[in-house]
Image (tube, rainbow, N blue to C red):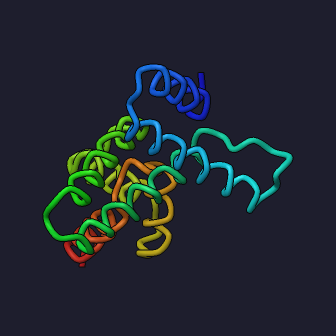
Amino acid sequence: MNIKETLMEDLKSAMKSGESLKKTTLRMLLSEIKYAQTAGDSSQELDDRAVEKVIFNYQKRLLKSLADYPEGQQKSQIEQEIKIIAHYLPKEATIEEIEAIIDSFIDSSEEKNFGVIIKKVMAKLGSTANGKVVSQKVKERLSSLN
């Protein structure tokens, strides 16, 4: 079962059990996925990797919006939405995993260009890694070579 099907099944069960926040959050996610699909080629279904990217971007927007709200009900609701969304994302890569992948690309390649390495590492890790962390680690590794 792909991620979109899982979201739809979980939406059905949230509707049956009366979990309004989960129902609203899942509807919003499915809407975001539908929007991303129609922004591209609407005749093609999004694959799991593209769906993960949509979910990750939505989660990132929610995290950014946390700073806009004072402590209270709205902020706690956004935090709960983030927890719901995190369930559908792959486990985040650890610093050690990121460093191991960076090292393998640097050691196996003659190319020591920052942009090329970032592109390869992010393609390998996908949405499991934060781009800022990867960038920082690549800079550290390349500076240690010089």
Vertical side of 68 occupied by 42: above or below: above
Between 100 and 124, the one nearer to me in the picture = 124
Between 65 and 39, the one nearer to me in the picture = 65
Q: Is residue 66 left or right of 41 when viewed as pictured?
A: left
Q: Look at the image and tell me in which quarter the N terminus lies.
A: top right
Vertical side of 113 occupied by 108: above or below: above
Q: What percent of the width, then of the height, locates residue 127?
A: 44, 51
Q: What percent of the width, then of the height, locates residue 43?
A: 86, 46
Extreme residue in the right direction: 43
Q: Quadrant of residue 74?
A: bottom left
Picture residue at 50% right of the left edge, 64% below the top: 119
Q: Quadrant of residue 113?
A: bottom left
Q: Look at the image and tell me in which quarter the C terminus lies.
A: bottom left
Q: What percent of the width, then of the height, locates residue 36?
A: 66, 57
Q: Is residue 28 left or right of 44 when viewed as pictured?
A: left
Picture residue at 60% right of the left edge, 34% below the top: 4
Q: What percent of the width, then of the height, locates residue 40?
A: 76, 59
Picture residue at 44% right of the left edge, 66% below the top: 117
Between 40 and 78, the one nearer to me in the picture = 78
